[in-house]
Image (spheres, rainbow, N blue to C red):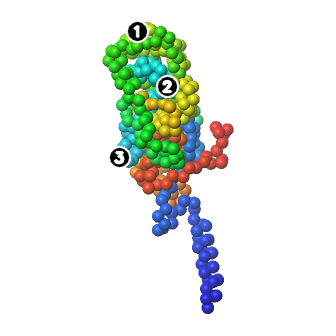
Amino acid sequence: MRVGYIPLLCGLLLILLFVLSGLPVGHELAGTGTKPTVKFVYATSGIMPQLLNTSQVDAFIVWESVVSTSSLGKIGSVIARDGDIPPDHKWENAACNVLVMRNDFIERDPEIAALLSAVTIAGINQIKKDPDAARNITANWVYGSKPIRSAGLYLNPNDVENEAFQHITFTSSAQLPDISRLQSSMNEDSFKMAEIKYVNSSVMHRAQELLNGSLPVLSKNPPVVRIGYLPSSDLYAPLYVTIMSHEEICDEYGFCLVPDSGKSGRPTAASLLYHNQTAAKVVLLPGSVGGGVMTGLGQDAMEAAYIGSVPTELQISMGNDASVIQSINAGGSGLIVDNSAPCTDWKSFISWVKDRSEKGNPVIVAVPQSSIQEEMMREAFDYEGINIILYGIPPRWSINDS
């Protein structure tokens, strides 16, 4: 009798395997406790709107002014910003970008380091004093004087900055974000956050003294200071403004950063002046990604950088001998979804993500790798009980198709 059960059991097993094989990838079996999933695609900020516009991704999160360009250009809809992303609105006031310097530069030229911090704070103050001029300066620096034309877009750069500046807080006092989840995702056992000192507060303390009228101690041989930054982002507006509004800043503080090439275009060199005396010669080194700029800093290719807080923290964690001096801004990030997506805010976005996952077609979100935006999404999806799967660009996509 027992032998007769064997064919029956085999038949039942085959039926079960057949049913399971028909389920779509990512389907959640009832009672298994499997979490819903979302897929991440690592992409540069410039390519994200095109990925969304060609249906290669369903959503992306990035910084300004890419957010406003995508929204004004009708490429996608902004459904959440820093303060909307859980948990507890923690990202609304977190430092998004920072001024960072090599430790040996701080030790070698402490007064120049402090002057650079002071002139950056002066740029932040100037933005608050004359926001209209700051928006115009930033638009010209990032986009130039001609309209933005790309993939059917035709936008006025000033219109883009008028929208973008509403969502950015320029501040020197925002706190660094917690990056523990991103560090854990990288499986780096060498990270020991409790033992890492990220911030050198003495530089900004001296900068405040200089802003209040203290006299700097300058060398007779002005050093050359190489500064890296990302010229495609308007989050570094304090740098642009402190250079292009140098006359106003020099009149107010006695020191300023004067462009060597006049007031047109995007300068590549400047002079740090104190009462018309050259304190340092500055070379501006444009980069394309934050991690690359931080790598250059670690390799002694530059002395300072205006860069994202998260790549800065990550590289300091891995031994890059540098320190954060101050924040540049908080806010300035946005989550953009396809115009046909059935969501208008974070809550409905999460419902959409879960629904797509249950149907075996997870939502694909593009994120900048090792960025504050990636850290936001990792923590938010963990909070919502959603697993993240890293996902490559679909095979049909080719950069040559653009």
How many residues crowd mark 3 within 10 Å: few (<14), some (14–19), many (20+)?
A: few
Any part of residue 139 in sight: no
**Residue at the image position 39 percent from the left and 14 percent from the top:** 216
- The vertical placement of 377 against 333, above or below, is below
- Outermost residue toward the bottom? 1
Question: Spatial distance from mark 3 to mark 1, Cα to Cα?
Answer: 47 Å
Residue 308: give x, y in percent of width and height: 48, 34
Q: Select label 2 or label 3 by which is in front.
A: 2
Element assignment for label 2: helix
Element assignment for label 3: loop
- The vertical placement of 202 against 278, above or below, is below
Element assignment for label 1: loop
Please report whichever mark, 1 or 2, sits nearer to the chain's N-terminal start: 2
Which residue is disc 1 drawn over? 275
Residue closer to the observer: 224 or 263: 224
Which residue is disc 2 drawn over? 104
Which residue is disc 3 drawn over? 88
